[in-house]
Image (cartoon, helix red, strand yellow):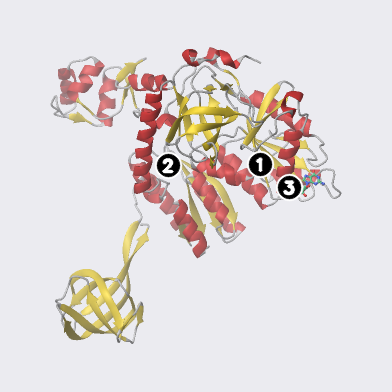
Amino acid sequence: MKDNRSYNNNKRISNVNNLKSHNKNLNKVNNGVFVFTRSLSVGELAKQLNILPSDIIKYFFMNKKMVTINQMLDDESIGEVCLNFGYDFKKEKVVKAENFEEVEIKDKKEDLVERPPVVTVMGHVDHGKTTLIDAIRNSNVVATEAGGISQAIGAYQKEVKGKKITFIDTPGHEAFTAMRSRGASVTDIVILVVAADDGVMPQTVEAIDHAKAAGAPIVVAINKIDKEGANIERVKNDLMNYEIIPEEYGGKNIFCEISAKKNIGIENLMENILLLSEVLELKANPKRYAMGTVLEAKLDKGEGPKATLLIQNGTLNNSDYVVVGTSYGHIRRMVNEHQKVMKTATPSTPVSVTGLNEVPNAGDHFMAFPTEKEAREIAAKRHLQREEQERSGTAARSLDDLYKQAQEGEITTLNLLIRADSTGSVEALKSSIMKISIKGVKVNIIRATAGAITDSDIALASASNAIIYGFNVRPTANIKAKAEEEKVEIRLHRIIYALIEEIEGALKGLTKPELKEVTMGQMEVRNLFKANKLTIAGCYVTEGHIKARSKIHLIRDGIIIYDGELASLKRFKDDASDVKSGFECGATILGYNDIHEGDVIEAFEMKEEAK
Ligand code: GDP
């Protein structure tokens, strides 16, 4: 193993340099490509392309378009000019230092070294995930480790044949999903535990969906092979329905047969993980400042905010300045899972650190900086940014967002979850949706099943920025609330072509779901009372029903003379929430008193409708 201590402060590359070089290449010609970030005036563009403004003006003139030197050009016109003058073009985003997770890290090939794979264990409840994690943790405990008491810090490393593997401690897909919904992906490989005596179960399938959505390869661990009733072939056959196919049948998934309880096949499983990670060519550059993700964080009574960081690139030193989520600090103490104090931590190493000024969230990104000033300033900006985001609500993908993004030409993939009343409709929907073909957009069905919409659908949709389409199913109030909380959009349909049209429409950026007025009821004004300066209308509900605080039209002789809303609705002396047809009530209109006898008050609601 390399001596990591050689990557000291002076020798490490600051990650902000990548940002500077990224932004430095903007508004410039690189290898014949003009990279720009915003609309430019004719004068600006000419200067940057090293041509005369009059050349551009002349070009447009020849194409029957008059422009002046100060005229702003849109992206399309900029592209046109570039091509005409022999350049290609590309629009890029300016990345700010505080959005360090967006910085594209480019490492030199010679700086990249192999890093351990990061592995998460998933599977159905009681199939043996925890037992497996424990078995791995306790397998071939080496002498050096034996001294330290192992503590749960969210992850641990194991050495197999001189190579390390990092295991995430919390099994199951809740933690996995929580990470992904924060935009963090830490897992390189998923171990899917399936009990040989129980076979493929609902959470097995969910785990497969999650792993696939995250693009993480799956290694199947068929567990409990020691048990009577273990049926390994059945597990293999069942998994084929989910495109998890063993190599022996021409597929690309590794299958290992194990008993987590009896410690059978664990070594072999780990060796297979190493084999796979070699194929994946997992690499990182230890010569830069560290960056990665928070696996766990808490407030320790004695030590203050404490976080487990997974280093994904670079090296973390025990006295580095770090920004973690929106908090920052100077690392005070850094230990591994055996409570051993660490001076440096290299890629894929999980470490627990103290010294932060706040407790970050699991899934937050972190980055180390050469100076305290940088770390402090960047953390402050991130703080502001998060507050703003919280105020404006998180930007999960809704059909409305989609429409906007489609118009701006930004959207590339639409993730969908489908729930339908029968497997027949699931198949019909899948095949119709797969036929949707719109240039530049990929429709990706991440789960399609029969049955009611579940909590787990919401979690998966939230983590994958997906929209849930329900076909002949209705979400319960609980599910609706959960979806609202997670900002997941659920669209319900009863007719396949309407559903398809809606998706197509949104993708083309043509049809935005429109709000349509739906009449709820009407009442006639039969008499009027004055109280203070208010006019109270004594009404009789002639049609439908009238709800308190409804939106209303005031209609006189068939003409709407006022639009507003009800301020009060009473039956006798009491407030009423809803008055049905055939009943009398008293009503006032918010901020409006010119009501006449014989007027009609019509209550309506605005409902969303896709064209
Ligand atoms: P989890 O819910 O997936 O984390 O499952 P657990 O690890 O808690 O295991 C559930 C039960 O299965 C426990 O009673 C374990 O002792 C048992 N178990 C786990 N692995 C094996 C195994 O390989 N063989 C047998 N016979 N039992 C096992």
Q: Earlier in the sequence, mark 3 or mark 2?
A: 3
Q: Is mark 3 within 8 Å of ligand 1?
A: yes
Amino acid identity at mark 3: His
Label 2 sits on a secondary structure element that is loop
Within 10 Å of disc 3 (Cα), the crowding (few <14, some 14-19, many 20+) is: many
Q: Is residue 249 visible?
A: no
The CA distance from mark 1 to mark 3 is: 20 Å
Which residue shows up at 83% across the image and 47% down it?
Answer: 230
Residue 37 lies in quadrant: top left
Label 3 sits on a secondary structure element that is loop
Of residue 500 and residue 520, the one placed in the foreground of this image is: 520
Q: Earlier in the sequence, mark 1 or mark 3?
A: 3
Front: mark 3 or 2: 3
Which of the labelled discs sits on residue 438, or is there none?
Answer: 2
Of residue 292 and residue 70, the one placed in the foreground of this image is: 292
Residue annotated with mark 1: 243
Within 10 Å of disc 2 (Cα), the crowding (few <14, some 14-19, many 20+) is: few
Residue annotated with mark 3: 127
The CA distance from mark 1 to mark 2 is: 26 Å
Residue 267 lies in quadrant: top right
Q: Could you tell me residue 402's position as x and y percent? A: 39, 46
